[in-house]
Amino acid sequence: MEYINYVIIGILIYIIGSRFMPANGIRNISTLELKSELKDKNKLFIDVRTPGEYKRTHIKEFKNIPLNLLAQKAEKELPKDKEIIVICQSGMRSVQASKILKKFGYTKVTNVKGGMNAWSL
């Protein structure tokens, strides 16, 4: 009986943890690395925070597409031939957004670790 409890706990930890772990094929960069990539016109920069969060503070190169709208807007608004760099407040929603983009067939997806919390000019 005790063995079953450990198995159930292990499965739950895996399921919860996998939501926040980067998926295969998703590049992760620091905010320091991001600064050198902001000038690249061949990349798209997407901020998946809420409009209120984005309005308070954002990086001018980033377009706001909230996470809850990303799936429906991705195919219409985001070309698949450009690298997409995703940011949020802490890095958790951008990991989820990166996984959504990969699921929709985007092959060049980059997550900004630490998000806006790690950003400083």
Image (cartoon, rainbow, N blue to C red):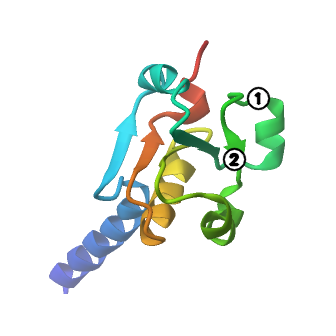
In the rendering, at what x and y percent does residue 86 appear?
54, 45
In the rendering, at what x and y percent does residue 34 appear?
48, 26
Q: Residue furthest top?
A: 121
Q: Tag 2, which secondary structure?
A: loop
The disc at residue 49 is 2
Say which quarter of the image contains residue 89.
Answer: top right
| Viewer-proximal residue among 61 and 53 | 61
Q: Tag 1, which secondary structure?
A: loop
In the rendering, at what x and y percent does residue 117 appear?
59, 28
| Viewer-proximal residue among 39 and 69 | 39
The answer to whether residue 87 shows anywhere in this view is no
Q: Is 98 displayed left or right of 59 in the figure? A: left
| Viewer-proximal residue among 119 and 104 | 104
Q: Amino acid at mark 1?
A: Thr
Q: Residue furthest left?
A: 3
**Badge 2: how crowded within 10 Å, few (<14), some, or many (20+)?**
many
Residue 97 vertical position relative to residue 119 in the rendered view, above or below: below
Looking at the rendered image, the quarter that the C terminus falls into is top right
The disc at residue 57 is 1
Q: CA distance from mark 2 to mark 1?
A: 10 Å
Say which quarter of the image contains residue 29.
Answer: top left
Q: Residue furthest bottom?
A: 1
Earlier residue among tags 2 and 1: 2
Q: Is 43 displayed left or right of 102 in the figure? A: right
Q: Is 46 displayed left or right of 7 in the figure? A: right
- Residue at image position (44%, 62%) is 106
**Badge 1: how crowded within 10 Å, few (<14), some, or many (20+)?**
few
In the rendering, at what x and y percent does residue 65 appear?
70, 53
- Residue at image position (72%, 30%) is 58
Looking at the rendered image, the quarter that the N terminus falls into is bottom left
Q: Amino acid at mark 2?
A: Arg
